[in-house]
Amino acid sequence: MNHKPISNRYFIRFFEMLPGVLSWGTLIGCVVFSFLVPVWVAVFIICFDLYWLIRVAYLAYFLIRSYKKMRRNMEFDWYRKLQKVKGYEDIYHLVIVPTYKEGLDVLRPTFQALVDSNYPEDKLMVVLAVEERDKENGLKIAASVEEEFGSRFDEFLVTVHPKDIVGETAGKGSNEAWAGKRAKEIIDEKGIPYEDILVSTLDCDTCVHKEYFPCLSVKFLTTEDRLHASYQPVPMFFNNIWDSPALMRVVAMSNTFWMLMEQARPERLYTFSSHSMSFKALVDVGFWQTNVVSEDSRIFWQNFIRYNGNYRCEPLLIPVYMDTVLADTFWKSIINQYKQQRRWAWGIENVPYIFSNFVGNKSIPLGKKFVHSFRMLEGFHSWATNALMIFILGWLPLILGGDAFSTTLLAQNLPFVTQWLMTISMVGMFVSATLNMLMLPRRPKKYGKRRFIMMLLQWLFLPISTIFLGAFPAIDSQTRMMFGRRMGFWVTEKVRKK
């Protein structure tokens, strides 16, 4: 990076406030203008619903296309193909698994998936990253994992991230950075070139598909300018999906479907949760930032800025399996889901970061700056407002428009027009429900056919989930950022039913 980011406090505060101002301005504007100029709002709502109908059809196409390609990738022998690619013998994989208060019932399947991979175990270097704040439990679990799996890998390392380091935010990013630096010491001793190492950061509940590492290796070796790219699999929240409540399942599948759609549009793809990248690029940017919550997306922007816009995210279209939110009680599951979505929505902390680094950096093409800035702001704005505008705000002109508006032909037809457009848009829900049934893991014997039927009917909860577990957490995060109320890293509780 050949420039210094803008550090002016007023500049930073402006972009911290911008997402919240845009979202609240849209929602409040809809209410105010429904009272002042209900005709304009009614026309806007119809146009927006029409736009949403087109968008649903557009995204459904990408969803189906990505699903078909992912199914082919899952059934393909990628290691056989890898053996035909020049240089494959030199590739190593560094796998970092951060953990905090998770039990062996969560971590054991993660490591079992690593050894079950269709890939040589002696090419895997694995780090189990423990927190000092959970040292006693963490080291106990680590000892069990090492006893069962440690000898299977080329290297198995347990790190303990110290607590209360000045300037750090306690969370996944600071733990990963500490683990990555300890792994670098071993890599340097071995003399392995950084360019030959792919580093994958896996959430502690992430079970990789058996073809993940060979598929990733093929993609890496056959991609042009491969060091300037991250590699994103499809997160599928299936580990405990049969045990989770319906609302949590809808949120989980919606997130999976969104990532599938984004994989078909790689120009819009950014790193999320578990992903991979070149160790060379990771060292170049100084590892993960230790003072942020959304380290998974921030590492992409660190590289994008470090390489002056010459960085991208490559889709893998191969799954990694993660947990659906589940707690001991239904209401605790709801609360945990809300907090998880709010933490994900805290990715708005990247807005002031990229703007402060974009301004004044003439090495990044202006077009790239504009496109990425717009996509980020539009994405967070849509997250916070679209569901409310679709399901609730369409009625505001009728409620607030007064007698003069309610007697017009437009007012009398507005409910029918919006209902007709939204009914057609339900095709997206039917596509989701169908793919959901096709993608589900085998039904456990402890559940009867009734549970299977509920998996289909759960999509009737989609409006509820998109508002209360989608829009509201996003608005919450943006409002906190707008008023300068910083968030810490909240660890999603992992529960597995026996």
Image (spheres, rainbow, N blue to C red):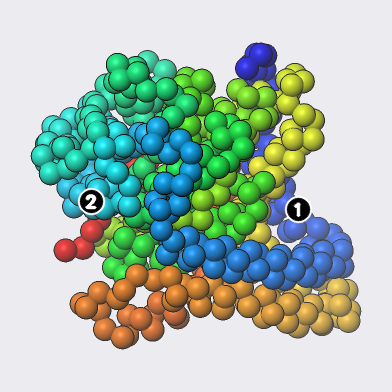
Q: Crowdedness of circle 2 by 10 Å Cα count: few (<14), some, many (20+)?
A: some
Q: Percent x, y for residue 238?
A: 36, 62
- Return the residue nearer the eye: 399 or 356: 356
Residue 67 is left or right of residue 396, and the answer is left
- The count of marks equals 2
> Can residue 223 be seen in this snapshot?
yes
Tell me which amino acid carries mark 2.
Gln
Q: In which quarter of the image is residue 39?
A: bottom right
Residue 335 is left or right of residue 51, and the answer is left
Q: Percent x, y for residue 102?
A: 23, 44
Residue 159 is left or right of residue 441, and the answer is left
> Can residue 100 be seen in this snapshot?
no
Tell me which amino acid carries mark 1.
Gly
Quadrant of the rendering where the N terminus is positioned:
top right
496 up-or-down from 312: above or below:
below
Q: Is mark 1 on a helix, strand or loop?
A: helix
User: Which residue in the structure is indicated by mark 1?
Assistant: 29
Q: How far apart are marks 1 and 2 (CA)?
A: 53 Å
Q: What element carries label 2?
A: helix
User: Which residue in the structure is indicated by mark 2?
Assistant: 112
18 up-or-down from 68: above or below:
above
Q: In which quarter of the image is residue 196?
A: top left
Q: Nearer the viewer, mark 1 or mark 2?
A: 2
